[in-house]
Image: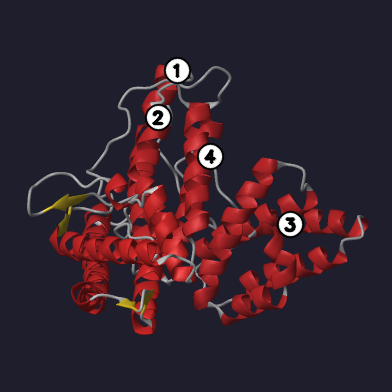
Amino acid sequence: MEVGAGAAARRVLREEDELVCRRLYGLLANRAQEAREVTAYLRPWRRDGIGLLGRPKPDAVNAVRRACRWALRDQMPPGYDAVVYRYTFDGSWSDGALFALSALDRQRFQAASAGIASRREFEAALNTALHRAQWIAELCSGLAIERPVLDIPAERNPPRHGLLRHGIVGRALCEEIAEQRAAGEALRHAAAAGHPVVPAIRAWVAATAGVLDRGLTDEDAGQGLRQLTDGLRHCVRRTVPHPPAAAGAYLTLGLEYLEKLEQRMPDHIEASGQGPQPAPVTVHGNVGAINSQVTGSSIVVAETVRGIEVSIGALDRDGRGDLATALQQLTAAVQLERAFAEDLRARLLDHVADVAEAAAEPERPRALSRARLAMAALTGAAATSSQLAQTLTTWHDVFNRFA
């Protein structure tokens, strides 16, 4: 990952936090203005009286019914479950119970808004609605938001010392971590292109933390990744203006953490009695290969394509020709796209292989999980490849089962 990526991600989150707060203050101002408007058209009726020959005046009925309908709406501050508000006028903490209607007030408002209240009940509804409108106007004007609203986690390092769990092979664990990092990088590019990848990123976090939990005895390894990316929960809220940007920032922090953990894996493996690990190598070749932090491992395009062809053959034999054809065309789109560098082409073909494996063996939950991440990565790459984008569009219904 590029130097300074974590600092840049935190800067993005601070900018998003500023925009979220502006939006929340705007919503509070709108709510206060609504309450002032209710106060304005109710106050004359309270002053001059609502009765005419023992019955409420028609104009008074309309005004109170309108006010009661407003009072029955949710008056909680926007985003209350994720935002901490303070009263600026007395410094006390806000409490959700302050916004709740009593059962009697709710019954009174419902009767008045339906036009079935007696004159006495009508007057009581007017007085209660007026008092509530005045209070909501004052409250919404006096609330301040505790910053930051979004999680902006400090830098976190993975455990320096750790052991592999019993039965875990260090090299295999390194391969799994490298796969997850590659999938995460693909999602990061998709987020940068503005694609709606928040669910895929959350799935990536769960899968990657699961790999760390299963492989290492130190529970802080997986927990550290979860804590750095916990702010993803904010990215599904309407108050966040740019969900892909915020999600991409959290993903970047998670990837930075995972990269640090990869660098410490040789020490964990040696401490577990599996011997020292030679330095990482890069394998080059005219078929293309990608760098790996695992000794002697390389993903060769030709071998990957052969694996995809095996899965396609199995699908043909099982009578699932639509899937087989879709995967053939997806493979060809990745192979023939000239804009892709060889290392990117190799990674994308790996993703196609994950989708093909899940299609051939749909009963394997882990294969399906990897296929979903792979489809997110391929969708992100399609932003720079018209041929790949066309293939995904043509076979959308077929590939949608892996989304």
Of residues 63 and 176, the one drawn nearer to the viewer in this rendering: 63
Question: Which corner quadrant of the image does residue 144 belong to?
Answer: bottom left
**Kind of residue at badge 1:** Ser
Local packing at callout 2 (Cα closer than 10 Å; few below 14, some 14-19, many 20+) is many
Does label 4 or label 2 sit earlier along the sequence? 4
Residue behind mark 2:
266
Residue behind mark 4:
175
Quarter of the picture holding the N terminus: bottom left
Residue behind mark 1:
272
Image disc number at residue 308? 3
* Residue 190 x/y as whole percent: 46, 66
User: Real-space Cα distance between discs 1 and 3?
Assistant: 35 Å
What scheme was used to colour the molecule?
secondary structure
* Residue 227 x/y as whole percent: 35, 39
**Kind of residue at badge 3:** Ile
Of residues 243 and 190, the one drawn nearer to the viewer in this rendering: 243
Does the residue at mark 1 contact the one at mark 4 (Cβ under 8 Å)?
no
**Kind of residue at badge 2:** Pro
Local packing at callout 1 (Cα closer than 10 Å; few below 14, some 14-19, many 20+) is some
